[in-house]
């Protein structure tokens, strides 16, 4: 072959080299893109599988394992947890049968408590007779009068009047109009003389005119000579 033909062939082969290199580079890029696509597709499938997996409510939460964990300590922890589970299982007793319930002995706190002793009614203290002094008169109960109304009329306390009349146990039942006679202590009995008007008599015994009129059941402030006036105590006895 002549030297001129060799010179002409070399430029042709040199001109084809860039095209071959470009094709190889494109093929490599396509291969890398395909491999990357497959990897991304696999990751996406794994993520979808994790998201769509239903959560088990009975699943036990995993506890983080510390680094450099001693195998003996891990085994001891597992034994403790198993023991706790066994204790929980034993703490729930099985339901008792009817025979066991029938023969079961009652607990001390379940035994019937003794009945409380019947409480006796508290007796009211009996009124004690009081002697405020003065003199004693007898009042016959009239229609419309009550036991405590009579006590107010003569300006004495109800307890004093009841103490001086022990036969009266029930004021509503034992006091009868025209029958019951009540003993009453008063300051005095005054016979009206000349010039004895109610104001003068009241001032003489230290009582008010109203008290004097109430004790003698007067509706008018007048007196008559020879009239006997009941003089009550100025204060309730």
Image: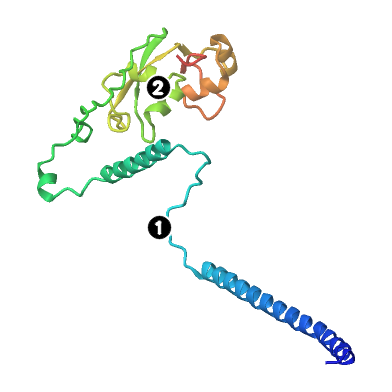
Q: Residue at x 45, y 37 (%)?
A: 70
Helix, strand or loop at label 2? It is helix
Q: Position of residue 25 (x, y in %)?
A: 75, 78
User: Position of 209 compared to 101: left or right?
Assistant: right
Q: Is residue 80 above or below residue 227?
A: below
**Crowd rating for badge 1 (residues with CA inside 10 Å; few <14, some 14–19, many 20+):** few
Q: Is residue 137 above or below residue 62?
A: above
Q: Is residue 28 above or below residue 112?
A: below
For residue 234, which numbered disc appears in the image? none
Nearer to the camera, 123 or 44:
44
Q: CA distance from mark 2 to mark 1?
A: 83 Å
- Mark 2 vs mark 1: which is more N-terminal? 1
Helix, strand or loop at label 1? It is loop
User: Position of 164 compared to 233: left or right?
Assistant: left
Regarding residue 223, the answer to whether it shows in the image is no
Q: Residue at x 37, y 12 (%)?
A: 136
**Crowd rating for badge 2 (residues with CA inside 10 Å; few <14, some 14–19, many 20+):** some
Nearer to the camera, 193 or 10:
10
Residue farthest along the top direction in this orientation: 133
Q: Residue at x 33, y 21 (%)?
A: 182
Q: Position of residue 112 (x, y in %)?
A: 18, 34
- Residue highlighted by disc 1: 58
Q: Residue at x 57, y 72 (%)?
A: 42
User: Position of 101 compared to 196: left or right?
Assistant: left
- Quarter of image, res 133: top left
- Residue highlighted by disc 2: 158
Q: Position of residue 62 (x, y in %)?
A: 47, 51
Q: Is residue 52 above or below residue 1?
A: above
Q: Nearer the viewer, mark 2 or mark 1?
A: 1
* Quadrant location, the N terminus: bottom right
- Count of labels in the image: 2
């Amino acid at each position: 072959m002549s030297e001129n033909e060799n010179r002409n062939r070399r430029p042709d082969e040199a001109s084809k080299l860039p095209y071959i290199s470009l094709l190889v580079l494109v093929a490599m890029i396509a291969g890398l893109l395909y491999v990357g696509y497959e990897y991304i597709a696999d990751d996406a499938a794994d993520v979808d599988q994790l998201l769509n997996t239903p959560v088990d409510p009975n699943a036990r939460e995993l506890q983080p394992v510390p680094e450099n964990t001693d195998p003996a300590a891990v085994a001891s922890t597992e034994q403790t947890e198993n023991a706790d589970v066994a204790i929980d299982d034993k703490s729930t007793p099985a339901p008792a049968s009817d025979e066991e319930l029938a023969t079961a002995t009652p607990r001390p706190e379940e035994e019937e408590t003794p009945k409380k002793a019947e409480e006796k009614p508290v007796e009211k203290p009996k009124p004690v007779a009081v002697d405020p002094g003065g003199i004693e008169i007898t009042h016959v109960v009239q229609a419309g009068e009550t036991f405590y109304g009579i006590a107010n009329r003569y300006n004495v306390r109800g307890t004093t009047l009841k103490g001086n009349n022990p036969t009266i146990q029930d004021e509503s039942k034992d006091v009868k109009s025209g029958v019951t006679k009540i003993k009453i202590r008063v300051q005095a009995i005054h016979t009206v003389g000349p010039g004895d008007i109610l104001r003068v008599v009241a001032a003489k015994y230290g009582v008010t005119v109203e008290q004097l009129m109430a004790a003698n059941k007067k509706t008018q402030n007048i007196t008559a000579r020879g009239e006997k006036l009941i003089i009550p105590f100025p204060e309730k006895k």
